[in-house]
Image (cartoon, grey):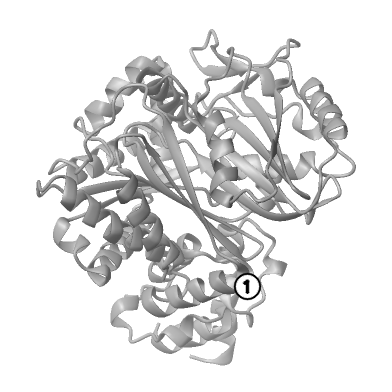
Amino acid sequence: MRRYLTGIDWVINTLDYICKKKTGVGNISQIVLELDGKLNEAILRERLVKCISQLPILCGYPARALNLCPYWKIDAKTSPLVLDTHYLDKSSSTREIISYFEDSLNKPFQNKREHLIFNLAFVGEKSYLGMVFDHRLMEARGAEAFLNLLGAEEVSLAALSHPEEPSHLDNWLDKFRAGRKINRIFLRLAKTQARVLPQAKDNAKSKVRLVSFDTQESARIIDGSFKEAGYLMFMPFLLAKCVIKLHRIFEQKEALSKEYFIPVSIDNRAQSLVKQDPFFNHLSFFLFRITPLEAENFQLTLAAIKRQMYEQVSMGLPEAIKEASYLMRIAPVSLVKLLLDLLARGENASFSFSFVGESAYTADYFMQQKVNNIFHLPRVPYPPGIGIFFNQFKGKLNTTLSCFQGILSDPEIEEVIEALKNLP
Amino acid sequence: MGEKNTKEIEERICRRLASILSCPVSKIKSDLPLHTLGVDSLSFVELLVFIEKEFNIKLMESGIDKEDFKTVRSLATCISKIA
């Protein structure tokens, strides 16, 4: 059985290849549920084993068909469940709890069939369930939807066991046109080199820091963003705030007057669609360019982001990226890496940014325990090795700073965290 | 432009918004604020691009006010005056 990979899936496979080459660990992330009660470990284990046995897709791996199209090979072989349990002191701070989950972001999967690792931490009367996932198998909202399904009383996995995706070996003219459009945009974007921080050593460890806001604080931030950036302009507002803060750090570390280049992943699928098909990648990207002069001023940065967002939607860039990426599937990931380097004229992104938006995890309870919050702890792709990520769960806003050791010093991390705490 | 035209514009915006949000048109209530319908910054920009192309309006130069963007109905009323 097979599921064909899309062009975006193949780009994500390439990112995974690059991350493994540079850091020894692939392009992974972890999603953590904060539960207001003690999860029954035995029942959880039983449910996870059942899930893995019923969903062979979870233990698949990339392969290539005779028609040269890459696909996810799904067979009867499975990978054993990995569920680690840990007891933390009941007085543990959020930082200490997150630090426990951070450890597993630096461990590679053991074999080609392993794409999920579960971590369960008990902290007093609370429990935290972490799921490390391979981005080749699912994206952030897909992982939320998958956990939503896993935590339900009646788990019905039948609909998910045979996910279909056509080979997309048609409409080549459209794909070439999209490719030409992307090339033109990249030519315009790559006029000057992108500003990047000095890179970390190979095999550096990934670090994550979390800032969480309660519902009142989150509402205040969203309201403030509408006032400062305009109605519904929450994502451009958050990105502009991140640019302003990181600009100070970049200025301290290197003074070259290059421009910032920020790819922003976007997934605008409706929740119902994410729940129907939580696997693989359905996202696309905006590509923002900000000059150091703009980055000195919040309103200038915001205006630049809004203008580019409007232009890119207007010219259909996110759709063109999806369409053009099909052309890359013919090449193995090592060659796609070279092609991407060539397309971007050897440029790296300055930093990663994403705003997951309203959660695809919608249940109030996970296996009878109330869900207080959901945190995303992504292992930021390397390069750029630094990223800021936002997600929302039932009106609560969370933000995660993810970076590799050596890219930011501890005082610099504290500086960014303080700025994020003081949003807006 | 009459009431009939405003209604037609409203329906066209509702249809487009339903397509952007991947939901049935019946879920798009014209008198509710856009954020309660699930519109975020990306879908909002997609809607703006649609309005400019569909109704041949330059929004920046149209004098359209932020209050006009609150609901589909207020947006349709405003467009019917300037289109």
User: Between residues A200 and B31, which one lies in front from this camera angle?
Assistant: A200
Q: Tally the numbered discs.
A: 1
Instruction: Please tell me which residue is depicted at 35% across the width and 41% down the height of the picture.
Output: A386
Residue at the limit of the structure toward the bottom, as seen here:
B2
Give percent across and percent down for residue A264: 39, 48
Instruction: Please tell me which residue is depicted at 86% across the width and 28% down the height of the picture.
Output: A46
Q: Note whether A226 is above or below A200 in the view shown.
A: below
User: Between residues A62 and A129, which one lies in front from this camera angle?
Assistant: A129
Q: Chain of mark 1?
A: B
User: Between residues A151 and A174, which one lies in front from this camera angle?
Assistant: A151
Please rate how many residues cluster around mark 1, counting C-alpha atoms within 10 Å: few if below 14, some from 14 to 19, many from 20: few
Instruction: Please tell me which residue is depicted at 37% across the width and 53% down the height of the picture.
Output: A414
Residue under numbered circle 1: B36
Residue at the limit of the structure toward the left, as seen here:
A256
**Quadrant placement of the C terminus of chain A:** bottom left
Q: Tell me where residue B30 sits by quadrant.
A: bottom right
Q: Tell me where residue A116 sits by quadrant.
A: top right
Q: Note whether B49 is above or below A47 in the view shown.
A: below
Left/right of residue B82 with respect to residue A311 in the rendered view: right
Give percent across and percent down for residue A413: 35, 49
Disc 1 residue type (three-letter): Thr
Give percent across and percent down for residue B63: 33, 87
Q: Tell me where residue A176 sits by quadrant.
A: top left
Left/right of residue A288 with respect to residue A126 in the rendered view: left
Instruction: Please tell me which residue is depicted at 50% across the width and 62% down the height of the picture.
Output: B43
Q: Is residue A228 visible?
A: yes
Q: Is residue A276 visible?
A: no
Residue at the limit of the structure toward the right, as seen here:
A154
Give percent across and percent down for residue A250: 21, 49
Q: Note whether A420 is above or below A221 in the view shown.
A: above
User: Between residues B55 and A261, which one lies in front from this camera angle?
Assistant: A261
